[in-house]
Amino acid sequence: MNILKRIFNFYYEGFKNMQVGKRLWLIIFIKLFIMFAILKLFFFQDFLDTKFKTDKQKSDYVTEQLINNN
């Protein structure tokens, strides 16, 4: 447990003292939010839930697509 605390403190102190690093991490988090939250809402809609009602139908469709579409 002591090693995990030392590793955490190493990174925490390192990022706390960085000036450019704080802006860089802010940009990274904004980009990740855009990629996973906003793009998912508009471009990656749940296809299986709109086409099939049961899990069995969904799994049959996925299996068929994997086998037939090499």
Image (tube, rainbow, N blue to C red):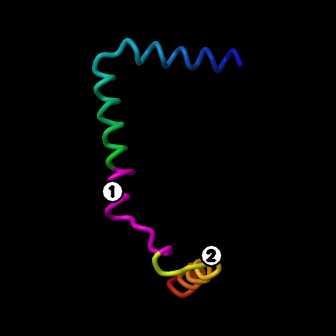
Residue ID at (37%, 12%): 17
Q: Which percent across, then down, holds residue 64?
A: 57, 85
| Depth order, front residue of 59/7 | 59
Q: Which percent across, then down, holds residue 8?
A: 56, 19
Badge 2 is on which residue?
55
Residue ID at (54%, 14%): 9
Badge 1 is on which residue?
39
Q: Is residue 41 magenta?
A: yes
On-image quarter of the N terminus? top right
Residue sitting farthest toward the right: 1
2 or 1: tag closer to the N-terminus:
1
- Disc 2 residue type? Asp
| Depth order, front residue of 48/6 | 48
Element under disc 1: helix
Describe residue 14's horizontal placement relative to residue 9 as left or right. Answer: left
Task: Answer above or below: position of 26 versus 58.
Answer: above
Quadrant of the rendered image containing residue 62: bottom right
Describe residue 11's horizontal placement relative to residue 33 as left or right. Answer: right
Q: Which residues are magenta?
A: 35-49
Cβ atoms at labels 2 and 1 below 8 Å apart: no
Q: Which percent across, then down, holds residue 30?
A: 31, 39
Residue ID at (45%, 69%): 46
Residue density around tag 1, few if under 14, some if 14–19, many if 20 or more, within 10 Å: few
- Disc 1 residue type? Leu
Residue ID at (29%, 16%): 19
| Discs 2/1, front | 2
Task: Answer above or below: position of 46 versus 37.
Answer: below
Instruction: Tell me how far mark 2 sits from mark 1, CA to CA.
Output: 25 Å
Element under disc 2: helix
| Depth order, front residue of 70/26 | 26
Quadrant of the rendered image containing residue 40: bottom left
Q: How many marks?
A: 2
